Amino acid sequence: MTASIIDGKAFAANLKEEIARKVRILKELHGLIPGLAVVLVGEDPASQVYVRNKNKSTIAAGMNSFEYLMKDDVSEADLITKVKELNDDPAVHGILVQLPLPKHINEAAVIETIAPEKDVDGFHVINSGLLATGGDGMVPCTPLGCIMMLKDQLGSLSGLDAVVVGRSNIVGKPMAQLLLNESCTVTIAHSRTRNLAEVVGRSDIVVAAVGVPELVKGDWIKEGATVIDVGINRIEKDDGKTKLVGDVEFDSAVLRAGAITPVPGGVGPMTIAVLLKNTVTAACRQAGIDEPT
Ligand code: NDP
């Protein structure tokens, strides 16, 4: 069997088109322009690229983009003041503070300052609580993108055995919760899991969010399983150049899986598209209007 490749780029492009259409409707019918504010602290080149891409995509969708660049040595108090200003700004419907933050800043304190209804990253404890209890909060972008791709691929996920490898607050845990909400039987694996190969081998759905290049071996994958590879790892090739690989050994997994996301071009492109989707949802909720269908 050779797996079908889940094309995250095409999926994200469709989603962005749908968002742009909704934004046009919101403008025409309600005079509402969803606005996303991104706060970047410091000059980390990877974060700068993410923020630039977010800004471009937000504008391309017809939304307002607000970008705030703060120096590496900004105090926690000043950053929190900025977040509070954005909480009070009616033109801003979504706030994203680019992580990681410098060591002297308490990330949790900053995230908990974001108004939960503007927390388009879905990291606020109120939003993780709502996700855990079946409420209607903001859901973290990467796991939400993964579940959208899985449902598109498989239809109902009910009753399927799923494993999430990784238990971070931003990917692994919300991913497991989303799968549980879809009535999967969910296993969460992590660095202390015994016999990961066996756990992966009995799963119909494998989501890898570890950050270890090609940790999940292709011959562990159950025949026909759907594999979602969240990992983004830059490794050096024999010729000294670098390339991106996922957390799954793609070349061998593709021979056993039913469907698989590539790296790059799988989960990655979905994250920004879902961020825009969350911003539109947040704007509609704050304005008290139904989101266009
Ligand atoms: P974290 O480092 O926060 O978490 C990694 C998890 O993997 C931990 O729970 C850890 O277990 C587990 N782990 C580490 N080593 C092993 C192992 N040998 N066996 C099993 N589990 C292990 O990472 P993130 O969740 O933030 O990110 C994971 C990956 O996803 C990264 O490559 C990141 O770049 C990528 N990513 C991609 C995104 C996108 O596509 N847009 C967005 C976010 C992340 P333990 O808890 O026991 O330490």
Image: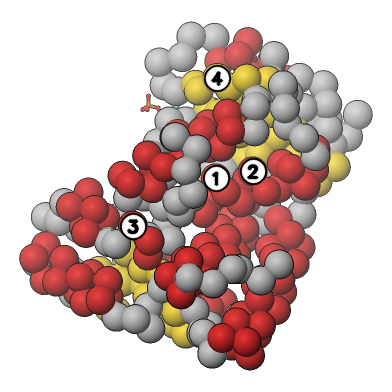
Q: Which residue is mark 2?
A: 147
**What residue type is disc 2 on?**
Ile
Assess whether mark 1 and mark 2 are in contact (beta carbons under 8 angstroms): yes
Q: Is residue 141 above or below residue 177?
A: below
Q: How many marks?
A: 4
Q: Which comes sooner in the sequence, label 4 or label 2?
A: 2
Q: How is the image coloured?
A: secondary structure
Q: Give me the residue at 44% from left, 34% from top.
A: 132
- The circle on residue 187 is 4
Residue 76 picture location, percent across and down:
11, 62
Distance, label 3 to label 4, CA atoms, is 28 Å
Q: Give me the residue at 23% from left, 69% from top.
A: 83
Q: Which comes sooner in the sequence, label 3 or label 4?
A: 3
- The circle on residue 143 is 1
Q: Secondary structure at mark 3?
A: helix
Distance, label 4 to label 1, CA atoms, is 15 Å
Q: Which residue is mark 3?
A: 116
The picture quadrant where one finds residue 150 is top right
Q: Which comes sooner in the sequence, label 3 or label 2?
A: 3
